[in-house]
Image (tube, coloured by chain):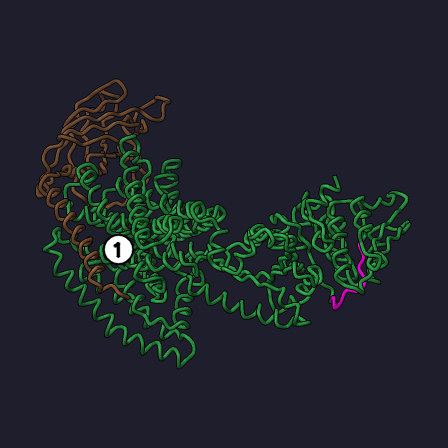
Chain colours: A green, B brown
Amino acid sequence: MHIVVLILIELLVVIGLSRLMGLGFERIKQPLVIGEIVAGIMLGPSLLGWLAPTWKAALFPVEVLPSLEVLAQIGLIFFMFLIGLELNPKYLRGNLKIAVLISHVSILVPFSLGCLLALLLYPLVSNGDVSFTAFALFLGAAMSITAFPVLARIITENNLQNSRLGTLALTCAAVDDVTAWCVLALAIAVTRTNSMAGAIPTILFSSLYIAGMVTIGRQFLKNLSKYYDRKGKLPQFLVAIIYMGVVASALITEVIGIHFIFGAFLLGAVMPKNAGLTRELAEKTEDFVLVFLLPLFFAYSGLKTEVGLLNSPDKWLLCLAVVGVAIIGKYVGTYIAARVSGIDKRESAALGWLMNTRGLTELIVLNIGLELKVISPLLFTMLVIMALVTTFMTSPLLEWTYPKRLIRLDVTDTEAAETSPEAQQIYRVLVPVANPKTQKGLINLALAIAGTRPNAIVHPLSLVEIQENYAFASMPIEADRLVEQRRIQIDSLVQSIQPPEVRARLRPIVRVSSDIARETSRIAALDHTDLVLVGWHRPAFDQNRLGGRVGQILSSARADVAVFVDRGLQQICKILVPYAPSLHDELGLELALRLLMNGEHIQLQVLRVTSPETPAGELSREFTEVLAQLAPSVRSRIETPILETYLDPLQAVVDHSVTVDLTIAGASRAWGSERQTLGRYADALVTQCVSSLLITRKYSQVTSHLASVLDIHPNESQVEQL
Amino acid sequence: MNHFQPKSLAFYGGAIAFVVGLFGVVTSYGEANLKTAQSIGGEYRLNLPVSELCGGGKPVFLSIQQSGVYVAAALTNPALARSPSISKSMTLSGQWQNQRLSLAGQVPVGVLCDNSKEATPAITVKIEGAISPNQPSTQSTTLTGTLSLDAATAPLIAQRQPVSQEEVK
């Protein structure tokens, strides 16, 4: 087969599998990068080569590997440029004194332990041509890595970027990153010359080059930045100059004797952090690099990873020692330094786990080590496993030591007060707002349901979705900018709500999320939300009534949910509840009564339809008991007619909806049995109902939507019902 | 920003001095006392009286991938491979210590026995031997020892081949 054809097939397989595994790992709340690294390993001798050696040999013959390597290395050069570009001095905004101390100790401890571990590993897994000094330096550097890019994304995903822990971790990781690259450069220089003394010229030239880039290079790039500001956009000519700069810088560092990745990183790091230029440049560069080239680097790296080499207990013990030293060194170093700096135990522990994130940066270091033959294939495999384990464990251990509910308290003190027992009596409506410009009606309905009492709050929830795990938009500073932009839109929505006094009951929540439905459900649970009110949109691509996020929220929210189908609702005067005895209809009835008690001019019609086939259902005992507790002025506004019809009961309800402003109906009993539908009856109502419609789905049998307006405690009402 | 306080400077100075000192001691000890295993990685051409074992007698190559004392290897037969440069599956593993090489594992039966009529797809192979001191200038590294196929054993002599192409596994 022609080599180009083969490479194209490889590209298809690598990109496809890499995305698939990335999605799979995202589902289990792991960074995309873990999935991509695993995909690379799967294509190599560890899985494909083990299960189907002929296939592996046919897909990755040795002749193709040099071409694959070239593509992977080009990807690596531009990825390093992106890492440098993302390294913003603004990240050094945490307590710098503490951060510098923590990051230095968190490098020195694992580095020292790595050097000691080298005494054990060198005679066992190193080959004769490598000097002990180079080996120890490399192992020490590999142990001290913290992957700033991966850590930054974990922090954004956990909405930690503005917390004390998040800013501190980012500052430490940024300092760690730069320090670790310097140690690696030293290790490469020593390896290439095989002695410390031999490396001195390389170190001198490197220092000169760095100084030149920071002064002359930076000045030149500042001029480019000014040119960008004048133009207001990034022309291809400027992109070409910058890319040529990246390649030239990479070449210079390679000639100096360190590695080409440093040149690319350095150019990115010294680029002026002009927000517009940086964003546009990153967005132009990242799609091709991250989607196309970087998976090739993972695949190339995976081809060299042979888990099968660990085929005896003694090798696994050595691997365990490597993983153990890496974790303990980083954790203990960080934890002790944080405690000495006065940080509490929980935060120190969380910081220790965060700093253990090694991910992709470690993989880059290891590939350089293998390429220079400082580390052998067996040690390479052990260190890849270490990188995977330390990155994989970060998210669950962070959640364990620093649960999300505590992160939330850390972010906003005002919300902390709301976890008191009194605060938990507050009736809360959570309103996911996808587009602040079009969802005023939804907010008004939520306010009408919440009512005017002070013990009711409406939380407009606006989540800024970060879809691309590695995109520039998922960096903390960029995520902050997007959150701020969305907050302004939400504030403007709040300010448009009339009358002004109700605005005090609107408490917007704006944050980033990689999974809108899951995050909505999580916030609903954390906030003790009584009702999630979502707006319904006509599906763009299919006929499923619940295609998209509404269906996902309905399926996953552990709270009562109401779906609002707006047909131009201006004000609520007449409400229709077509009643049939079911859990979901009971919720509809409760919400209707709540609206009734909150609005003095609202009329409620609880309609029961009978036909020869279906007799009218009795009103529930709970409803009749509630009716008895209502003030006469409220009770007088309720009608409970029974309509006998030979028509389809649905058609009767549709006909009745002409005369009302809002129809409230429960989801059909079978709503969850078919995917992405509310059930036949509710689905038909969505399309045929003339008035605006609220479809209700009951989740919690404990939640009482009337307790706060009837002044009865939910538990009391439960006892009464029993 | 008070990094230049005497206390901070003393701490950083002390910590860095400690690590540099530790690194110095460890590397001096390592360079002086620790020895790695001699490099034996590469491709060896086996001169086997295979007929004694399972009939045949065709050229077979032993590719050794070394990680210190741990060794992985593959036995390949160029006549069987679709492409001579197809990466090899390392099915043998063992150790290289005290100038002694020991390898064991499973090898597809056709690699060694071209007239095999046996149904078993793989055969257990054991290689025991010594490798003469490496002389890169002459490229005359030689492996001498024995090769066992299941129960049968035969003497083995293998010559390391000059490196023709760097293969990335």
Q: Residue at x 74, y 53 (%)?
A: A710
Measured as percent of width and height from the top left, residue A277 is found at 39, 72
User: What span is colored magenta in the figure?
Assistant: A569-577
Q: In the rendered image, which quarter is residue A451 located in?
A: bottom right
Q: Can you say whether B169 is above or below A603 in the image?
A: above
Position of residue A250 in the picture relative to residue A439 (left or right): left
Circle 1 residues within 10 Å: few <14, some 14–19, many ≥20 = many
What residue is pinned by disc 1?
A104
Q: Residue at x 22, y 27 (%)?
A: B57
Mark 1 residue element: helix
- Nearest the viewer among A346 and A352 is A346
Q: In the rendered image, which quarter is residue B49 located in?
A: top left
Q: Kindly give the residue lying farthest to the bottom in the view shown.
A: A230
- Nearest the viewer among B98 and A414 is A414
Please state which amino acid type lies under the numbered disc 1. His
Position of residue A231 in the picture relative to residue A639 (left or right): left
Q: How many marks?
A: 1
Q: Residue A665 colored magenta?
A: no
Measured as percent of width and height from the top left, residue A66 is found at 29, 52
Measured as percent of width and height from the top left, residue A149 is found at 37, 57
Q: Kindly give the residue lying farthest to the top in the view shown.
A: B151
Q: Residue A576 colored magenta?
A: yes
Question: Does residue A628 show up?
Answer: yes
User: What's the chain of the residue with tag 1?
Assistant: A
Q: Can you say whether A325 is above or below A682 in the image?
A: above
- Nearest the viewer among A327 and A339 is A339
Position of residue A19 in the picture relative to residue A219 (left or right): right
Position of residue A320 in the picture relative to residue B38 (left or right): right
Question: Does residue A10 show up?
Answer: no
